[in-house]
Image (cartoon, rainbow, N blue to C red):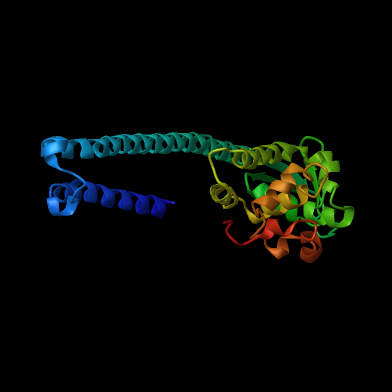
Amino acid sequence: MNNKKNYTGAIFAASVLIIVFILPPLLTRNWFLGNLFHFDTTGPIGDTIGGIINPFIAIIAAWLTYKAFIMQYDANQELRKDAEINRFENIFFQLLNMQQGIINELVLRAEVINKDGKENFPTQKITLHGRETFRHIYEEGTSCKIQLKDGYVVYGGIKHNIKNLGYNYMAKNEDLSFLDHYFRHLYRIIKYVDESPVLNKKEKYSYICILRAQLSEYELGLIFYYCLSTNGNGNFKRLTETYALFNDIRDYVLNDPIKDKKRYKAGAFNTKYPE
């Protein structure tokens, strides 16, 4: 587009040079004009040349005015887009900070009553904060019984329970409701990027990459299976497929990588940058 504009401008500039610097000398030569003009009938040379050149000058002036208007309009549009992107980024990074705040507030106080099937295993009291809670609630085996302080009991980790009880385990287990805020806010961030009118597809993908870079492998596992449950199997799942949220998820995070990945469209694991 810019090359086309430059090409048009070059043609116009060349035309102006021809009109201003070449035509006037030619138009003042009788050998060139022949019988077309006789200054004794058309008037003095100044009047003749002025009558010929003035319309061209007026056209050039109008064109320059138009070009100045277009340039100013383009500059204003660019400034407007920059301002809109700045507003978008301010909200986007505020949402990321809020998401990090939600993670930091996660506290898991539990008693591990039985681990690895050991009958005489001494009760262990544990307190986990932030992202370390994701690994614990996701990876623990079924032989680990966790007594939560609010009265809930979780037998084993989410990964094991999904393998034994199905993809809808997370939706049916009310003991995991403390993660609802995390999932809702994460979905809100991705949806905010997706619905932005100031970004093209490539720019949206770049911002989702920023979000994805902050997710741990266990968070990706939780999100992966959450979107296969009735709670997330809708717009949330569609957005993960649109923006390749799982393009670097590790196979060992999943129960059955080949089978589980077939539940998603290929876009969820696309490693190619969108055009």
Q: Position of residue 265 (x, y in %)?
A: 75, 57
Left/right placement of residue 13 relative to residue 176 reads left
Left/right placement of residue 39 relative to residue 260 reads left
Q: Can residue 246 be seen in this view?
A: yes
174 to 5, vertically: above or below: above
Q: Which residue is drawn at 58% across and 41% down?
A: 100
Left/right placement of residue 233 relative to residue 201 reads right
What quarter of the picture does the C terminus occupy? bottom right
Q: Position of residue 89 (x, y in %)?
A: 50, 38
Question: Closer to the camera, 69 or 90?
Answer: 69
Q: Residue at x 55, y 46 (%)?
A: 200
158 to 189, vertically: above or below: below
Q: Where is residue 192 in the image (x, y as percent from the top left)?
A: 61, 38
64 to 162, vertically: above or below: above
Q: Position of residue 70 (x, y in %)?
A: 38, 37
Question: Closer to the camera, 77 or 121?
Answer: 77
Q: Residue at x 23, y 51 (%)?
A: 18
Q: In which quarter of the image is residue 270?
A: bottom right
